[in-house]
Amino acid sequence: MEIKYSSHAVQRMVQRNVSTQEVEFVLTDPDGTIKQSKDKYIFYKKMKLRKDNMIAAVVVRKKRKLCEVLTVLINFEVVK
């Protein structure tokens, strides 16, 4: 899967001390996903070595093997 990052996502990753490796892990092995629209999803995962709950990435799928990360969140909680 090819991953592109919006400038906003990069800013938030720096602010929240989230690496590209962590985001890639969230996208390739998520604990869950939430569909937001036709092509927009939230991928989330609890990271063992982080104490800030779950990391989430809001992603738009551009093509079958290409996605763009719009933003990255920490302290993410799934509300049911």
Image (cartoon, rainbow, N blue to C red):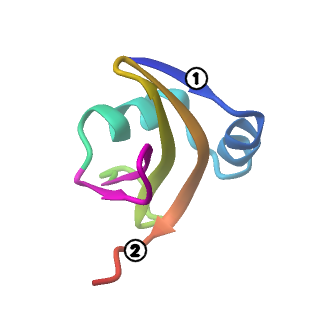
Instruction: State whether the magenta stretch is mostly helix, strand or loop.
Output: strand
Q: Position of residue 34 (x, y in %)?
A: 33, 60
Magenta region = 31-45
Q: Is residue 80 above or below residue 4?
A: below
Question: How far apart are labels 2 and 1 at the CA level?
Answer: 24 Å
> How many circles with numbers are drawn on the protein?
2
List x then y, in percent, for residue 29: 23, 38
Q: Check disc 2 and report its element: helix, strand or loop.
A: loop
* Residue displayed at 49% across by 48% down: 57
Q: Position of residue 51 (x, y in %)?
A: 44, 63
Question: Which quarter of the image is occupied by the N terminus?
Answer: top left
Residue 6, image quadrant: top right
Residue neighbourhood size for the residue with mark 2, other residues' Cα within 10 Å, grouped as few (<14), some (14–19), many (≥20)? few
Q: Is residue 29 left or right of residue 37?
A: left
Residue 35 painted magenta: yes
Image mark for residue 77: 2
Q: Which residue is situated farthest in the front direction here?
A: 38
**In this orientation, which residue lies closer to the viewer: 75 or 3?**
3
* Residue 75 to residue 22: above or below: below
Q: Residues within 10 Å of mark 1 (few under 14, many from 20)?
A: some
| Amino acid of disc 1 | Lys
Rendered residue at 35%/57% (across/down): 35
Residue 4 is marked as: 1
**Amino acid type of the residue that numbered disc 2 sits on in the rendered structure:** Glu
Q: Is residue 58 magenta?
A: no
Residue sitting at 41 percent across and 49 percent down? Answer: 38
Question: Is 16 drawn above or below residue 6 in the view shown?
Answer: below
